[in-house]
Image (cartoon, grey):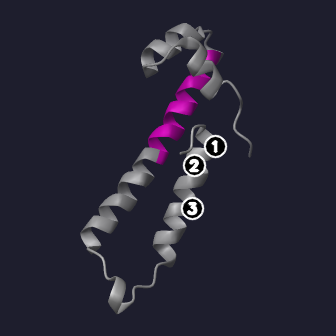
Amino acid sequence: MPRSVEEILKHSEELAKRFEDYEPRADDERDVDAVVSLRDAVMERSEAERHVGEAVAKARTAGLPWSTIGTFIGTSGEAARQRYGKAPAR
């Protein structure tokens, strides 16, 4: 299971590509609504995680300590630093 922002974004992009490239066969027909719902949820989670990463970077630039950031995102300050402390590779 992906843990870092980069891993989550990469995973969501891989899943989105799999959904986009999917060519159904008669023997593996799926419920279209379920597939679309899952794809949308994964993409929403990816966008939300990207937004959190950007907000954390902004908070750090503004001088907020990791302990405060951790409180907001529901982790310890150290866990927040480990997850968001490195700039994403571009």
Q: Position of residue 52 (x, y in %)?
A: 50, 31
Find numbered disc 1 in the image and state the secondary structure of the residue it sits on: helix
Of all residues shown, which one is farthest toward the bottom?
Answer: 26
Q: Amino acid at mark 1?
A: Glu
- Residue 85 sits in quarter: top right
Q: Is residue 16 magenta?
A: no
Q: Main secondary structure of the magenta part?
A: helix
- Residue 57 sits in quarter: top right
Q: Amino acid at mark 2?
A: Leu
Mark 1 neighbour density, 10 Å: few (under 14) some (14–19) many (20 or more): some
The numbered disc on residue 6 is: 1
Which residue is at 51% across, 70% downward?
Answer: 18
Q: Position of residue 58 (x, y in %)?
A: 59, 23
Q: Is residue 66 above or below residue 52?
A: above
Q: Position of residue 72 (x, y in %)?
A: 43, 17
Q: Amino acid at mark 3?
A: Glu
Alpha carbon of mark 3 to alpha carbon of mark 1: how far?
A: 12 Å
Tell me the residue that label 2 is attached to: 9
First in sequence: mark 3 or mark 2?
A: 2
Q: Is residue 88 above or below residue 71?
A: below
Tell me the residue that label 3 is attached to: 14
Residue range corresponding to the magenta coloring: 46-60
Find numbered disc 2 in the image and state the secondary structure of the residue it sits on: helix
Confirm or deny contact between disc 2 and disc 1 (CB under 8 A).
yes
Which residue is at 53% across, 40% downward?
Answer: 50
What is the tally of numbered marks visible in this picture? Answer: 3
